Image: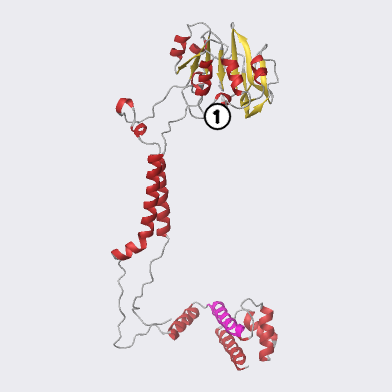
């Protein structure tokens, strides 16, 4: 397509530099969306309640994973519950008579000093039992946590009935009692050892605040722990995050932040990424620019023909001629754009009276072998178009 300017005419130039008004018009929707998301994040941050990090099976934790409800039930029955987070603290409590050791932290599973403490002990979900429960073997694979029947003679389990339990699967030494069967072992094993009773459970989910009211979970927990006058509840020590900056009274900067700040920052990052993707894929307005040279359509055709001749691209030139002829005569024959070859050849033969084989060879035959053949093909195709136009 050529653009021709008459003498004396000039084409008005249009600046492509964005103005402040155009920038605001194109970006005001994004700014409004960002302000709405920011306002929502601020409101959620200000109105959300304080939520600390949950500590599974911690007697001081009120979250769903904690066990403060069980600790309160034990205290209501007159059992003293002492929360400790070190072997030294547990050893200091072990000097008191009629005290049971509850180990819910796998952190201390291989500590020989803990294994030497006297009294009954209950170990929860520990993968290593060589020190704390000699003779008990942890089978590979484990089991899914669900409600299970005890199917044993242990009074604490038979009185509780079905319990939500699973996790590790154990086998015990001779003389042990296995409850809640799972595969080739049990989720609970209890046996006498060194004048005391050692009990191992596959998981402590039934002791959590979430599961305690279900099935016989509370009954089993109280039956296992409420036989002593006091329980030493050993939990994992609180580990400060590496690199935390100390704040007032030993608190880190992250402890002083509202819990909704990370969520708000995450939402802001997602918003920026979506905005960048949206704006980055958008095209700008069409810009009219003056052509440096006016090129006639005939010159373009001649130039392409010279290129075909220089490269001896007879097949390419023949294909272009044939494709152009087919595109122009097909609508005149009353055929659609998806017409098959035989339909086009048959319609041309009827309209022009030419031999169908000659028409098919001209439109879909092999490429000419020389320039004379290409010129003859062009003339024959032109004759077909003229005949179709006349009829």
Indicate whether residue 330 is drawn in magenta: yes
Residue 29 lies in what quarter of the image? bottom left
Indicate whether residue 388 is drawn in magenta: no
* Of 279 and 314, the residue lying toward us: 279
Q: Residue furthest front?
A: 76
Give the dominant element type of the magenta stretch: helix, strand or loop.
Answer: helix
* Element class at badge 1: loop
* Of 236 and 288, the residue lying toward us: 236
Residue drawn 36% across and 31% down?
255
Residue 292 lies in what quarter of the image? bottom left
Does residue 112 appear left or right of residue 352 in this picture? Answer: left
- Magenta residues? 313-331
On-image quarter of the N terminus: bottom left
Badge count: 1
Residue 76, placed above or below residue 327 = above
Does residue 193 appear left or right of residue 3 in this picture? Answer: right
Residue 384, placed above or below residue 38 = below
Instruction: Give percent across and percent down for residue 192.
Output: 62, 9
Residue drawn 59% across and 13% down?
198
Question: Mark 1 highlights which residue?
Answer: 210
Instruction: Give percent across and percent down for residue 218.
Output: 59, 22
Instruction: Give percent across and percent down for residue 238.
Output: 42, 24
């Amino acid at each position: 397509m050529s653009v021709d300017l008459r003498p004396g005419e000039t084409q008005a130039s249009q600046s492509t530099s964005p103005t402040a008004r155009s920038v605001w018009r194109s970006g005001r929707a994004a700014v409004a969306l960002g302000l709405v998301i920011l306002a929502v994040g601020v409101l959620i941050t200000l109105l959300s309640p304080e939520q600390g990090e949950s500590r599974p099976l911690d007697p001081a934790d009120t979250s769903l994973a904690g066990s403060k409800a069980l600790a309160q039930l034990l205290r209501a029955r007159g059992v003293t519950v002492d929360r400790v987070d070190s072997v030294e603290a547990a050893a200091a409590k072990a000097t008191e008579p009629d005290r049971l050791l509850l180990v819910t932290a796998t952190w201390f599973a291989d500590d020989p000093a803990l294994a030497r403490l006297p009294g009954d002990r209950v170990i929860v979900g520990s993968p290593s039992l060589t020190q704390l429960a000699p003779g008990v073997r942890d089978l590979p694979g484990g089991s899914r946590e669900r409600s299970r029947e005890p199917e044993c003679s242990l009074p604490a389990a038979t009185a509780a009935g079905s319990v939500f339990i699973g996790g590790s699967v154990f086998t015990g030494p001779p003389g042990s009692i296995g409850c809640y069967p799972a595969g080739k072992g049990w989720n609970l094993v209890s046996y006498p050892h060194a004048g005391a009773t050692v009990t191992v459970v596959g998981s402590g989910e039934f002791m959590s605040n979430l599961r305690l009211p279900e099935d016989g979970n509370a009954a089993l927990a109280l039956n296992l722990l409420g036989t002593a006058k006091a329980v030493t509840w050993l939990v994992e020590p609180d580990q400060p995050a590496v690199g935390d900056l100390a704040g007032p009274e030993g608190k880190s900067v992250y402890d002083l932040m509202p819990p909704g700040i990370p969520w708000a920052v995450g939402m802001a990052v997602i918003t920026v990424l979506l905005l960048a993707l949206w704006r980055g894929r958008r095209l700008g307005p069409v810009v009219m620019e003056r052509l440096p040279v006016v090129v006639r359509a005939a010159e373009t055709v001649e130039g392409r023909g010279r290129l075909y001749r220089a490269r001896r691209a007879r097949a390419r030139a023949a294909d272009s001629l044939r494709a152009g002829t087919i595109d122009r005569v097909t609508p005149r024959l009353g055929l659609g754009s998806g017409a098959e070859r035989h339909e086009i050849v048959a319609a041309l033969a009827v309209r022009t009276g030419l031999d169908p084989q000659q028409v098919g060879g001209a439109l879909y035959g092999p490429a000419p072998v020389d320039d004379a053949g290409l010129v003859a093909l062009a003339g024959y195709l032109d004759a077909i178009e003229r005949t179709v136009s006349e009829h």
